[in-house]
Amino acid sequence: MKIFLGDKLVDEKDAVVSVFDHGLLYGDGVFEGIRAYNGRVFLLDEHIDRLYDSAKAIALDIPMTKAELSKAVVDTCKANDLFDGYIRLVITRGKGTLGLNPYLCKKAEIIIIAAKIQLYPQELYDNGLKIVTVGTVRNHTEAINPRVKSLNYLNNVMAKIEAINAGCMECLMLNPQGQVAEASGDNVFAIKNGMITTPPSWCGALEGLTRNKVMEIARKEGYEVREDVMARYDLYVADEVFLTGTAAEIISVVDIDKRMIGTGKPGKITSELSAIYTECACSEGTPIA
Ligand code: PXG
């Protein structure tokens, strides 16, 4: 496998970073998870824009232009003959000292891995996911804003641990006010009487690109779509609940905290949106070859 590291493609065995890299020492950095479908990188410009916004929010200078970085992503796919897969784009603060001070890190490190991902088995797409609310509260927006896709994912990892310990593969995270934020690695939507609702990002959700695409598709299909404060109650009594993410795509939730959602089967509107999403993903994007 070829990995993009710093400013060039190298063999996987040579793709090593310093133990003094602040990405490792402090989770100091930002990242994107990107998908390629059918020889195209889906939503590449949107991912690059979000990455630069995340970097700006943590005062991290990415030592490349957006155009150069986009080209590096496409080149990494090409070098690995990856036309369908998952791309992890990571920017760390770079090599520094053992102290926190990020200003002592001379140059941010750029890492691009083009590989495969499968989060959930097909069975769960067919039958839906069971989730629980976890005690780990989503980061306060003035601690680390969840809109920053940072390398510091312990908040999400702690939530995931609780989910798995409870026999679930995903979970529901609330913000410090007790409002619905998102799942550990996905955004959450509810549908009630044909109205589609998802929490606004200020409630502690990453502004997911799958989320944005699904909102765009749903509006085009004539559905009313709102970003609104949500309580767990709104999810419990919804007709349909689903999660969205680059890796997971769209997956139905059929059980939350032992409340059956809707009929207990993936819902009609979710399936309709999911089919259109797949169509878009397979036909739009930046060509690799
Ligand atoms: N919320 C969070 C906290 C995420 O990490 C999403 C929402 C969905 O955003 P996009 O832009 O992908 O629609 C994410 C991204 C995993 C894993 O292993 C999940 C993500 C990233 C990295 C790993 O579950 N999801």
Image (tube, rainbow, N blue to C red):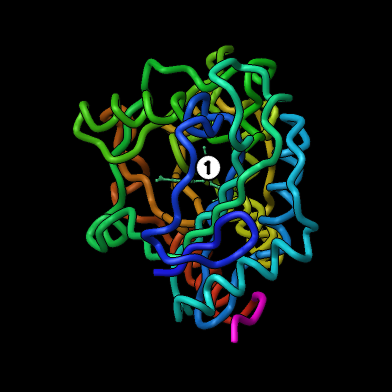
Tell me if residue 198 can be seen: no
Q: Nearer the viewer, residue 124 or 103?
A: 103
Q: Is residue 7 above or below residue 187?
A: below
Q: Of all residues shown, which one is farthest toward the bottom?
A: 289
- Judge whether residue 214 is colored magenta: no
- Residue 57 position, x and y percent, is 75, 31
- Considering the whole magenta stretch, tell me its main secondary structure: loop
Q: Nearer the viewer, residue 103 or 116?
A: 103
Q: Is residue 193 above or below residue 259?
A: below
Tell me the residue at 43%/35% (across/down): 184
Q: Of all residues shown, which one is farthest toward the top?
A: 177
- Confirm or reject: label 1 Cβ below 8 Å from ligand 1: yes
Tell me the residue at 61%/45% (across/down): 109
Tell me the residue at 44%/64% (across/down): 271
Please tell me whether mark 1 sits on a helix, a strand or a loop: strand
Tell me if residue 279 can be seen: yes
Q: Is residue 209 above or below residue 134?
A: below
- Residue 258 position, x and y percent, is 26, 29
Q: Nearer the viewer, residue 76 or 180?
A: 76
Residue type (three-letter) at the residue carrying disc 1: Asn
Q: Nearer the viewer, residue 105 or 48?
A: 105
Q: Which residues are magenta?
A: 285-289
- Residue 2 position, x and y percent, is 45, 69
Tell me the residue at 49%/38% (across/down): 18
- Residue 192 position, x and y percent, is 53, 43
